[in-house]
Amino acid sequence: MTVDRGKTLEHVLAVAREAGEGIARIYAGKFDVEYKGPNDPVTRADREANTFICAELARAYPGMPIVAEESDPASYAGFGKSPQAWFVDPLDGTREFVARNGEFAVMIGLAENGRAVLGVLVCPALKRSFIGAEGMGAFEVNEAGDRKAIHVSGHEELKGARVLVSRSHLPDAARARMNELGLVTVPCGSAGVKAAKIACGEGDLYAQPGRAGKLWDACAPEAVVCAAGGVWRTTAGFGYDYANESLENGRGIVAGNPKLIEAIVAVKW
């Protein structure tokens, strides 16, 4: 299926914002929290946003697999064989949503032939939205629809670089190594929020050694960061493969400008 990236960005942004409005309504009131596993919460906001986004994408892009966090895996089985696939995290940062610190995002990304090419990040509590696509650049879009071009920071040395790190998943050994390198660690929830800050230069580097979620945690963030002039790699320097049906991001994430990524992938963790 041929996708017009400009029109698709506008449509997916509208879908993500509508999902974000529903999430914001739930966030403003009382809600129950369930657990899919240890330290893995889920709420009605996750599930309702997932249902809405998947229905909208299925209607507009029939036959294209939708790999979404709260969907039954059977619904996207075999997605790796498709030339195009959507990756959806309807509420990235559920722990932050539960903690009510505002650091959560709706994330919708498109991969073509295993590569992230288009992404939308909507941060409902922060009232900020970000879009990016290969060959089109990256933008912050305000509530009136006005776009501002964004770009990754120009800081090129590890020493003094602001590195955005997980609030809940950063191993002590990795934190110590970052301190040794002179990095300034800045805790931040949600891969989407961290990616947005990297894309607009509010942080220099995003680093998560070891396990770094699943493919729906990376596709939209990677597309936005790369469209903003950045690079998204594993900690060993390899690219992400969105045709990998294991879904696991087991080799970490580093994202930032090319010089910083070249320096960070040379580090022995």
Image (cartoon, helix red, strand yellow):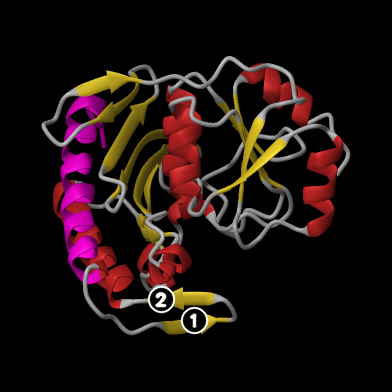
Position of 263 relative to 108 (above/below): above
The segment highlighted magenta reads 1-26
Indicate whether residue 143 is drawn in magenta.
no
Q: Residues within 10 Å of mark 1 (few under 14, many from 20)?
A: few
Q: Amino acid at mark 2?
A: Val
Q: Amino acid at mark 1?
A: Lys
Residue 173 image position (x, y, % from top left): 84, 54
Q: Which mark is residue 122?
A: none
Residue position for label 2 = 42
Residue 139 image position (x, y, % from top left): 31, 25
Disc 1 + disc 2, Cβ < 8 Å: yes
Q: Secondary structure at mark 1?
A: strand
- Distance from disc 1 to disc 2, alpha carbons, whole Å, reads 7 Å
- Residue 113 visible in image: no
Q: Which residue is located at x 25 percent, y 80 percent?
A: 30
Residue position for label 1 = 36
Relative placement, left or right, of 74 versus 3 is right
Q: Secondary structure at mark 2?
A: strand
